[in-house]
Amino acid sequence: MALAATDTNFETEVLNSSEPVLVDFWAEWCGPCKMLSPIVDELSNDLKGRVKVVKVNIDENPNTPTKYGVRGIPTLMLFKGGNLAATKVGAMPKAQLAQWVESQI
C-alpha cells in the first residue's frame, strides 16, 4: 500500500528518501485517478525494497503539486536522490506503468 505524503512531510518522505520514490498526485473527484490507484498500490507491493511509493492528495496539499508544476492529474513523478527524474501524466495499464518505473530506476 502506498504511503500518503503531505506538504508537511514531502521533504522527509520523498526528497530525503534513500531509495527512488514514485509520487502519485491525485484527487477524490478524479475518475482516472481512481482507476490508477489500485495499480499504484499493486506496484508499491511489487517494487517493495526497490522503490518507495507515495500518494499526494492535491486538494489537501496544494503547495507540493504547485511547486512541481502539476497541471493535470493523475500525474506520476519519480524522484531519485531528492531530484525529479521523470514525469508521466494520465492513467495507464499496470504493465506500462511498471515498465516506465523500471526504465527510470
Image (cartoon, helix red, strand yellow):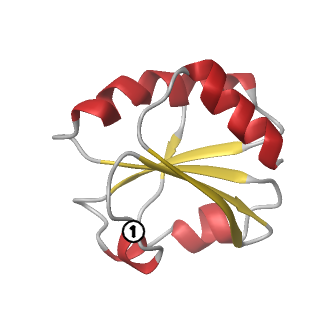
Q: What amino acid is labelled 1 in the image?
A: Pro
- Front residue of 17/35: it is 35
Badge 1: residue crowd in 10 Å (few <14, some 14–19, many ≥20) = many
Please identify the residue farthest to the left as the structure is shown.
Answer: 29
Q: Quadrant of residue 51?
A: top right
Residue 44 shows up from this direction: no
Which percent across, then down, holds residue 44?
Answer: 64, 31
Which percent across, then down, holds residue 8?
Answer: 43, 73
Q: Quadrant of residue 18?
A: bottom right
Question: Is disc 1 placed on a helix, strand or loop?
Answer: helix
Quarter of the picture holding the N terminus: top right
* Residue drawn at the location 63% of the way across and 26% of the way down: 96
- Front residue of 103/49: it is 103
* Residue drawn at the location 22% of the way across and 39% of the way down: 30
- Front residue of 5/36: it is 36
Residue 72 shows up from this direction: yes
* Residue drawn at the location 41% of the way across and 29% of the way down: 37
Q: How many marks?
A: 1
Q: Is residue 63 above or below residue 96?
A: below
Q: Is residue 101 left or right of residue 38?
A: right
Which percent across, then down, holds residue 80?
Answer: 77, 62
Q: Is residue 13 above or below residue 34?
A: below
Q: Is residue 82 left or right of residue 55?
A: right
Which percent across, then down, holds residue 50?
Answer: 83, 39
Q: Which residue is mark 1?
A: 65
Q: Is residue 38 left or right of residue 61?
A: right
* Residue drawn at the location 31% of the way across and 66% of the way down: 61
Q: Is residue 91 above or below residue 76?
A: above
Q: Is residue 90 left or right of residue 99?
A: left
